[in-house]
């Protein structure tokens, strides 16, 4: 899908220019950023997504002033499986921990994992795609074949195997004064290094067409170095699809992390994540609905908002109309 | 055409080689390969271990170990006593994955492929009806949505597709259990069972199986349908705006006929690709769904093997799915080039 739309971007058809003509005249007087913002905010779903995402981020940030992490991880066996009440708005879990406090700290972990692992993915995917597209030849062949091979191995299965044999034996790490399960670091790296393939393909096909464009050939003709050519002329022109892919990547990674943690192989307790909070919900499925509903709904809302934002970005950064 | 098919088959070979190297690397890094072959629970002594390592070929350089893993070492003489010379009459015991030796399960001592084949039918029973349901839903809803573009119904359907596409599979599964198994039971209505393929003690009838199939199959089907519906909608919209459709209207063909022949047929092409690429992953089993509903398929086998560190079965499942992906990708390309002759022609000129 994305590959085909990318290659189309460089052969704009006359009909397309014609229909966009009016819009382009309007856009000429504004800055790129202003155009982008006007397009993005006109996208109703994207605005909803941005609001939803801001609300979730506010919830997990403000929440950490209301509850301490010790409270979120505090066992209280006399109050386990308690239904939502004034004291515990989201109820308590199988060892009497407050579910609301755990959704707050779990949310910080889940969102941090997705942002950081997508950062790893973006760096690896962009770098490998650039190398493959720019240098071509046997290097391109190897990178793209490895990408294809990794795409043939089912991701969830692969992640489960890797996190089982690396993740569960990691010592705790100290981040900004908080003790966090070492499995978090493993999950970030494993996710980052197993999801770069799609992005690498997008970047490669962009680079392949960009490097034949006149401005790149001209830059090369005046003797510009490879590094300068790539970072000044090729990469900036390939940014828009990378940003879109990154946003949509965040939603995918939130889902995958939730699935892995739900199966007990992701983030290890006592550190909470939205996925591992639901791990034992099946035991009391006939009574304790609050146990899976609140973390599950937060996962759904954050995935949904990332998808909405990604969709809006795709329309706003449409390469046809940005000048 | 033949040239195109041959070209595609040749392309698949390096891909399979790289997949095998990746799986071999994972396999070598996650566990002691020796443990896989130890048949009894008794821990071996130091000398026994060394002997075994030599028999398995684990004292050899890594590229030889890879070759032994692929094609076995029963064709070569090995140095069983470790004196530096190969013994003339002792051959290795391994047959290699290419000759269907995936090693024995650490738990049941059966060959890994036997364990997998026991579970495969159960997964197919779940996944085939699920997938048919998902594609039907996607086609019908996607077509309705495209034909009524920008109507209230279209907005409702696309939003719903977005929501379900963003939904974690366990959320929808647990929600369905809450409504259709627990809710209906509490209200005294007929309700669905939660776990397994059959209730223990019940006769194994088809009705019983279908009752157990409803929840896992429909929760998976809704998620897949949501993802596919968006493709169906956009490819039908694209086909509706194509020149040949305008021509068909202009020459006065019946609307129904244009939709069935010109629009739907062309819009189905992209779906063929997506289905072909997804099918092996679908048939590989659904880890989450099968473990929630205790459905004894490949996904549940994978989780069981993972918790008990049963590497041969784990690697067997990964290998099976990876090979299925490559084969189905090949078949998809061939089917696609039959449906759309432009593809093969483009391959020849480019």
Image (cartoon, helix red, strand yellow):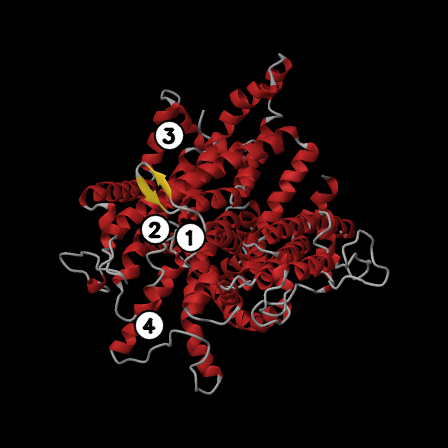
Residues tagged by mark 2 and mark 4 found on one chain of the structure: no
Q: Nearer the viewer, residue A26 or B178?
A: B178
Quadrant of the frame with the C terminus of chain A: top left
Q: Which residue is mark 2?
A: A273
Residues tagged by mark 3 and mark 4 found on one chain of the structure: no
Instruction: Name the side, left or right, on which A282 lies relative to B130.
Output: left
Of helix, strand and loop, which one carries label 1?
Answer: loop
Q: Note whether residue B117 is visible.
A: yes
Query: Mark 2 and 1 residues: CB-CB less than 8 Å, in contact?
Result: yes
Q: Nearer the viewer, residue B53 or A154?
A: B53
- The image quadrant of residue A188 is top left
- The image quadrant of residue B70 is bottom right
Q: Which residue is mark 3?
A: A36
Q: Earlier in the sequence, mark 3 or mark 1?
A: 3
For image coordinates 39% across by 40% down, the residue present is A115
Q: Is A28 situated above or below B13?
A: above
Q: How far apart are labels 3 and 1 at the CA level?
A: 37 Å
Q: Which residue is mark 4?
A: B180
Query: Mark 1 and 4 residues: CB-CB less than 8 Å, in contact?
Result: no
**Mark number displayed over residue B174:** none
**Mark number displayed over residue A266:** 1
Residues tagged by mark 1 and mark 4 found on one chain of the structure: no
Of helix, strand and loop, which one carries label 2?
Answer: loop
For image coordinates 51% across by 44% down, the residue present is A195
Q: Position of residue A140 (x, y in %)?
A: 65, 35
Q: Is A11 situated above or below B282?
A: above
Q: How far apart are labels 1 and 4 at the CA level?
A: 30 Å
Label 2: few (<14), some (14–19) or many (≥20) C-alpha neighbours in 10 Å: many
Q: Position of residue B181 (x, y in %)?
A: 33, 74
For disc 4, the chain is: B
Instruction: Name the side, left or right, on which A203 lies relative to B207.
Output: right
């Amino acid at each position: 899908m994305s590959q085909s739309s990318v290659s189309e971007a460089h052969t704009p058809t006359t009909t397309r220019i014609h229909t966009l003509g009016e819009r382009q005249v309007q856009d000429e007087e504004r800055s790129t950023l202003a155009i982008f913002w006007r397009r993005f905010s006109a996208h109703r779903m994207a605005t909803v997504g941005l609001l939803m995402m801001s609300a979730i981020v506010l919830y997990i940030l403000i929440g950490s002033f209301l509850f301490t992490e010790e409270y979120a991880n505090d066992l209280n066996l006399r109050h386990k499986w308690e239904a939502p009440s004034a004291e515990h708005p989201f109820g308590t879990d199988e060892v009497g921990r407050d579910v609301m406090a755990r959704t707050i700290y779990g949310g910080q972990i889940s969102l941090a994992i997705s942002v950081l692992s997508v950062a790893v993915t973006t760096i690896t995917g962009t770098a490998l795609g650039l190398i493959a597209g720019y240098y071509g030849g046997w290097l391109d062949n190897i990178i793209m074949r490895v990408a294809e091979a990794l795409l043939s191995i089912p991701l969830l299965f692969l992640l489960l195997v890797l996190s089982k044999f690396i993740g569960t034996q990691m010592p705790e790490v100290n981040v900004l004064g908080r003790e966090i399960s070492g499995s978090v670091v493993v999950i970030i790296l494993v996710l980052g290094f197993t999801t770069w393939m799609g992005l690498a393909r997008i970047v490669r096909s962009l680079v392949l067409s960009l490097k034949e464009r006149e401005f790149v050939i001209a830059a090369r003709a005046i003797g510009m170095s490879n590094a300068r050519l790539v970072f000044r002329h090729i990469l900036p022109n390939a940014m828009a699809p990378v940003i879109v892919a990154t946003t949509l990547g965040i939603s995918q990674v939130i889902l995958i992390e939730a699935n892995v943690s739900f199966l007990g192989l992701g983030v290890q307790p006592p550190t909470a994540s939205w996925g591992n909070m639901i791990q034992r919900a099946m035991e009391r499925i006939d009574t304790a609905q609050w146990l899976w509903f609140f973390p599950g709904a937060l996962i759904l809302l954050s995935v949904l908002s990332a998808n909405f934002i990604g969709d809006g970005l795709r329309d706003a950064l449409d390469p046809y109309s940005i000048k | 055409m033949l040239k195109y098919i041959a070209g595609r088959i040749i392309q698949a070979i390096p891909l399979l080689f790289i997949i095998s190297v990746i799986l071999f690397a994972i396999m070598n890094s996650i566990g002691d390969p020796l443990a896989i072959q130890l048949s009894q629970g008794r821990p071996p002594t130091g000398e026994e271990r060394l002997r075994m390592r030599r028999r398995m070929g684990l004292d050899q350089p890594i590229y030889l170990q890879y070759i032994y893993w692929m094609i076995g070492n029963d064709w070569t003489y090995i140095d069983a006593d470790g004196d530096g010379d190969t013994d003339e009459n002792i051959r290795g015991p391994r047959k290699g994955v290419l000759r269907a030796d995936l090693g024995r399960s650490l738990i049941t001592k059966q060959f890994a492929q036997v364990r997998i084949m026991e579970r495969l039918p159960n997964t197919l029973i779940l996944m085939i009806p699920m997938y048919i349901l998902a594609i039907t839903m996607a086609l019908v809803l996607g077509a309705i949505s495209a034909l009524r573009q920008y109507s209230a119904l279209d907005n409702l359907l696309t939003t719903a597709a977005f929501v379900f596409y963003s939904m974690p599979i366990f959320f929808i599964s647990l929600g369905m259990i809450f409504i259709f198994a627990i809710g209906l039971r509490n209200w005294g209505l007929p309700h669905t069972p939660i776990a397994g393929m059959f209730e223990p003690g019940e006769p194994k009838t088809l009705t019983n199986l279908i009752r157990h199939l409803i929840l896992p199959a429909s929760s998976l089907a809704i998620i897949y349908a949501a993802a596919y519906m968006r493709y169906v909608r956009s490819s039908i919209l694209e086909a509706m705006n194509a020149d040949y459709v305008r021509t068909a209207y202009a020459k006065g063909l019946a609307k129904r006929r244009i939709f069935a022949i010109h629009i739907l047929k062309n819009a189905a092409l992209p779906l063929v690709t997506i289905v072909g690429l997804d099918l092996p992953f679908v048939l590989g089993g659904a880890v989450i769904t099968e473990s929630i509903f205790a459905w004894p398929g490949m996904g549940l086998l994978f989780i069981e093997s993972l918790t008990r560190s049963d590497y041969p079965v784990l690697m067997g499942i990964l290998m099976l799915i990876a090979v299925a992906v490559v084969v189905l990708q090949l078949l998809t390309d061939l089917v696609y080039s039959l449906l759309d002759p432009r593809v093969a022609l483009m391959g020849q000129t480019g």
